[in-house]
Every structure is written in C-alpha cells, then in structure tokens.
Amino acid sequence: MAAREFPTIKAIRSFVIGGVGSGGDYHNVKGGHWLIDSPISTPCSRWEKYRASRTSWGINVLGSFFVEIEATDGTVGFATGFGGPPACWLVHQHFERFLIGADPRNTNHLFEQMYRASMFYGRKGLPVAVISVIDLALWDLLGKIRGEPVYKLIGGNTKDRINFYCTGPEPTAAKAMGFWGAKVPLPYCPEEGHAGLKRNVEFLRKHRESVGPDFPLMVDCYMSLNVPYTIEIAKACQDLNINWWEECLSPDDTDGFEQIKRAHPTIKFTTGEHEYSRYGFRKLIEGRNLDIIQPDVMWLGGMTELLKVAAMAAAYDIPVVPHASGPYSYHFVISQPNTPFQEYLANSPDGKSVLPVFGDLFVDEPIPTKGFLTAADLDKPGFGLTLNPAARAKLIPSTYLLTLPTNSLGAPAVNGTGVNGTGVNGTEVNGTEHVEENPKAVKLGELSST
C-alpha cells in the first residue's frame, strides 16, 4: 500500500513584531525591566557609558520577528525569534527559494541547503538564527499536519515532568515559586577592578545568605570575563557553593575553558547559548571542559540542529540544558535522555513572578507552575501555541520592508533600520499602527525583471 501524499510548502510569510514585550527577542522589553536596566556585566561593560542599561549598546536593536509557513492543505506552522527587518529580508531574498514546493518533512535537507547557501556570510549569528526560526516553523507545521506534539516527532517523552530553575534578579522569589534553583547575572565586570570584584563577591554572598546554604545558586557572566578574572572570582566564592559559573568567556575563547577548568577542576562551568551549529559545538564538547552545554534552539540552527548537538553531547555524557526559548525548548527537553532540567527566564519586569517567555504573543504558552511542567502540558499539535488576536494586530508584514521606490530620488519606502527606530514609511515600528503600501514601490525580488 502506497504512503499517502503529504502536503508540500505553498507559501512562507514573515512579519516584524511591533512594540515591545512580544516575541522571540527576550531583551526587547519596556524600560525598567530587570533584563535591561539592572546592573549586569556584559562585553560592553568595559566602557562606563554602557553599564547602566543594556539597551545603551543595542542589545534590543534587532527586535522580534514571526514566520508562517503554509502547506498546500492549508495548514500553517509558525515560530518566533529575534532578527527584526533584516531577518525578514533573509527569509524572502535568500531562504525562501529552498522552501517553496519542498516536502516539510525533509528538515535535514532544508537545513543543509539554507546553512550551506549562507556559509559565505553566515555560519553564526543572525543568518543561522533566521534559519532556526524557519526550522521551528517547519516542525510546528509537521506536528499540526500529523496532529501530534513536536516532542512525539523527535523521540517521544523520556520523562513525564520537566523541572525548572529560574534566571532572574531575586533568588528568594525563585525559591518561593517552587523552582529548584536560581541563576543571577553577575553585576560588575573585570574593568571595574578590585573594587568591582569585591562587590561581585558581596553581591553573591548576599544572595547565598538569603536562600540558605542548600538552595542551588548559579551565576551568569554573559561573555564578559576573561580567564584570569574567572579563576580569581571562582576562588573568592568557593565558600558560597556556587552550583555553576555560566558563559564566563567570549564564545570564541574555547581554549580558555580548558584553562579555567584546569585551575578549578571541581567547579562546574557552562556555556553555549551564543554558539551556533554542530560545528561550533564540536570543540566545546570534545574538550570535556564544560559540565553542561546550553544551546539556544532559536539561535543555533533550530530543532534540527539541536538534535544533532544533543546526540554529540550524549556520546560524552555531557548534559544539554537549553537557554530559555520557552516551549521550543520544552519539547526538546522532554524528549531527550541527556536533558535533566530546563531554564525559565523570568519575564516579569521585577523577575518575581512567572509570565510567558514570549509575552502576549500567544494565548496559551505553557509556563511552569510550582517549578515544573508535565508532558500533558505539551500535548497539543505542533508546539501547541495559538497566536493572540491582539498580538496579530502588531504584526507588520515584511512586504512593507522588502520594497524600494521606483524613483530612486523619491521618498524611501523604509525610513528606519530597526524595530526601535522610526521604522516603515515614517510610522512607528514600535507601536501597533500599520502602514500603507507605497503604490509606486517595487519589491526587491522584482528588481531583476524591471
């Protein structure tokens, strides 16, 4: 008996998500939010003018975007991520050619085509993040066509429950909400000298005392330290029983992790959220200098690539604990044997309550209750998400971004370059107002025929 004919990809649409607080750019939030406006050591903290707020150096400059992939049977899969207008441009001007007419089940093939076609300008960063969102939309589409949750498509559940730790500014709140542990951002950078080091130790000591000696406490260093400083601060905090030190070094300093592990062989070090593809993770895993790897499924290449990285890590008995990414991570974690728990990134402005990771974008995003979720919480087709009608009004179709005026001396169709700028045709991309299409504009994809 022949297999039934499977729907193919009919169309792909992309949108910039206007406003703040919705979608896959975690840091595109309102001013005053702990994620952007509390003391957090970053790679730009070495310059004093960029210490007060992470938005000062542009952490939210790209903003969120949203992808829909429609099959020939009318089923629509979708996903969100970060990348804003540049991401939409890549979706249509480059990656769309590999998708239209393709079988959505060919996730490995489609990833390889997009990854290899963008290798000359990609390999890491935004291009791979865009591929990630396309890949997640494909998995969502497959689950919906088959009427099954994504985790059932990638191996089924290996556990009935996911336990969470919480990343946020208040470990006492995380403990009270039922999370098994808490991770705090390190406030001060190496360039702030011995005084900064002392304040870091005092900061961590205060939090250790607030939650007691046995509650796991982790530290996120956000790529902002160097090898000597990491060795020094880890030694200074040995009596605080820090569960792990995260992302201490630049993602490119893979050899540095060998040095800090050699200096502190019994202390746990983790990294990976800003690494990309199986090629990027290969050296991190083979070195055996990391106790946990932490890929972000919305960045490293999507579910398709994350499964390859997880298999590689499993061969070295290294746990995989994804960075944030909400339900996309939850389906992965519950399906794999080497994923012991998951991160919840506190999305409330003060970090003291549990809110959806993607803000108001979806009406039914599962969130941990008392520090856990069960397989039953994920038992809906695809990733189980329903777009919020109110949020749909904030989706700006990329057709407005992918146009140029026919008269090169006329008013440009695009007046800004980012979600936080003036935006499209003089309107606020950060607001909810839609734009009128320029009747004299021509789509970029049509330029070759004009």
Image: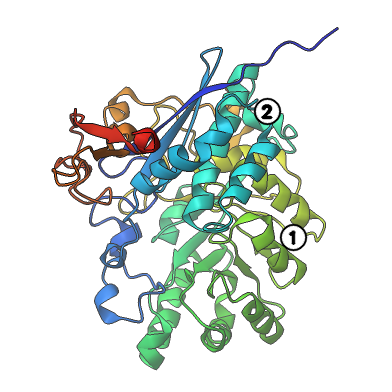
In the rendered view, tell whether residue 208 sits above or below residue 141.
Answer: below
> How many badges with numbers are in the image?
2
Q: Quadrant of the N terminus?
A: top right
Residue 282 visible here: yes
Q: Residue furthest top?
A: 1
Q: Which mark is residue 105?
A: 2
Give the alpha-carbon distance from disc 1 to disc 2, as whole Å.
29 Å
Residue 370 visible here: no
Q: Please name whichever residue, 83 or 9, is drawn nearer the observer in this view of the structure.
A: 9
Eye-nearest disc, 1 or 2: 2
Identify the secondary structure beneath mark 1.
loop
Corner quadrant of residue 184: bottom left
Mark 2: amino acid: Arg
Corner quadrant of residue 147: top right
Residue in the picture at 17% in, 48% down: 422
Q: Residue 235 in the image: x percent, y percent?
A: 58, 86
In the rendered view, tell whether residue 425 sits above or below residue 388.
Answer: below
Q: Residue 392 in the image: x percent, y percent?
A: 32, 27
Mark 1: amino acid: Ile
Residue in the picture at 58% in, 58% down: 123
Which mark sits nearer the N-terminus, 1 or 2?
A: 2
Q: Which mark is residue 234?
A: none
Residue in the picture at 72% in, 48% down: 308
Q: Is residue 320 left or right of residue 198?
A: right
Q: Residue 194 in the image: x percent, y percent?
A: 40, 92
Q: Please name whichever residue, 334 or 212, is drawn nearer the observer in this view of the structure.
A: 334
Q: Which mark is residue 318?
A: 1
Q: Residue furthest front?
A: 450
Q: Residues within 10 Å of mark 2 (few under 14, many from 20)?
A: some
Identify the secondary structure beneath mark 2.
loop
Residue in the picture at 27% in, 47% down: 419
